[in-house]
Amino acid sequence: MPTKKSAPSVEEQLQSLRSYGVEAKSTGGGKWSVQKGDCVAEIEQTSAGLRVVGSPGFQIGAEVGQLLDGGYQKFLKTPTRKLPATADHLHRMHGFQEALAAALGEPALYNLALGTVSTAYHYDRVKGRANP
């Protein structure tokens, strides 16, 4: 009879993140800020181990930009700016998201493996038009 594998400890998951080149800094209360290059995310401790909170972002100066899909182009949106996302931004963000999933033992999902998933989708460029 196969034995059930126990979930990795928080320290094992943090070590796994480091093996992927991801830096983890504790922010207290069972939460960590993780970063690889300009890509950043927040993780927290749950009963099942460490999990990503929200969507990863891209460090732009002192702010973190979230990926916004405008339908015709992707953007990095911070609280004060909106910049076009380059292929390099998307490639690094996708690699970061894959590293987080692999290091934390998340399942590989088909739609996520195809490319970077945006935080928001804004396809209608006509101002004032109500979205259904």
Image (cartoon, rainbow, N blue to C red):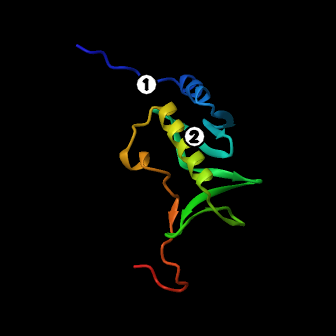
- Residue sitting farthest toward the right: 62
Report the front residue among 55 and 48: 55
The image quarter containing residue 131 is bottom left
Taking the image as shown, residue 25 lies to the left or right of residue 71, namely right
Report the front residue among 6 and 109: 109
Taking the image as shown, residue 76 lies to the left or right of residue 114, namely right
The residue that label 1 is drawn on is 7
Residue 35, percent from left and from top: 66, 40
Q: Is residue 28 above or below residue 82?
A: above
Q: Is residue 77 above or below residue 59?
A: below
| Secondary-structure class at tag 2 | strand
Residue 21, percent from left and from top: 63, 31
The residue that label 2 is drawn on is 43
**Rendered-image quadrant of the N terminus:** top left
Q: Is residue 51 above or below residue 54?
A: above
The image quarter containing residue 106 is top left
Residue 105, percent from left and from top: 45, 32
**Rendered-image quadrant of the C terminus:** bottom left
Q: Residue at x 39, y 37 (%)?
A: 107
Q: Is residue 83 above or below residue 16?
A: below
Residue type (three-letter) at the residue carrying disc 2: Ile
Q: Residue at x 48, y 54 (%)?
A: 117
| Secondary-structure class at tag 1 | loop
Quote the CA–CA distance across marks 1 and 2. 17 Å
Q: Residue at x 55, y 66 (%)?
A: 73
Residue type (three-letter) at the residue carrying disc 1: Ala
Residue 47, percent from left and from top: 46, 33
Badge 1, how many Cα within 10 Å: few under 14, some, many 20+?
few
- Residue sitting farthest toward the left: 1
Report the front residue among 100 and 12: 100
Badge 2, how many Cα within 10 Å: few under 14, some, many 20+?
many
